Image (spheres, rainbow, N blue to C red):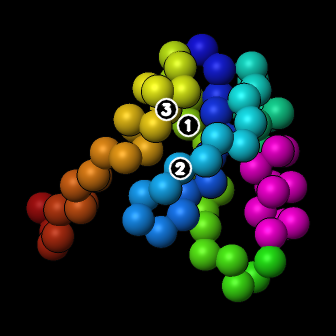
Amino acid sequence: MPYFVYAIQPFAQLEQLGESPSFPEASRQARALRAAQPAQQNRRIRIVFADSPLAAEDLLLQVREAPPEGDD
């Protein structure tokens, strides 16, 4: 399964920026993209491991639960 690099903009707008067969390659690409974007640009660069671009977008759009609060 490949690693996909995505830009996430406001209102959950996704843009696929790349695809890599290994995590180190995807990580280098994501770091370069983060360093090159202007500070005022309101987008996040994320890496996701998935079978296809459609599966990657589904994972990126899922709402994650907040961690439990307090001590156990």
Numbered disc 2: secondary structure: strand
Mark carried by residue 60: none
| Amino acid at circle 2 | Leu
Q: Which residue is mark 3?
A: 56
Query: What residue is at 65 percent from the left and 28 percent from the top?
Result: 3
Instruction: Decide if residue 61 is on the left or right side of residue 44.
Output: left
Compute the Cα span from label 1 to label 2: 12 Å
Number of the front mark, 1 or 2: 2
| Residue 4 higher or lower than 62, as above or below | above
Q: Which residue is mark 2?
A: 14
Of mark 1 and mark 3, the one earlier in the sequence is 1
Earlier residue among tags 3 and 2? 2
Q: Nearer the viewer, residue 66 or 29?
A: 29
Which residue is painted at 24% across and 61% down in the image? 66
Residue 4, given in percent of the width and then of the height, sits at 64, 33
Residue 42 position (above or below residue 1):
below
Report whether 6 appears left or right of 29: left
Magenta stretch: dominant secondary structure = helix
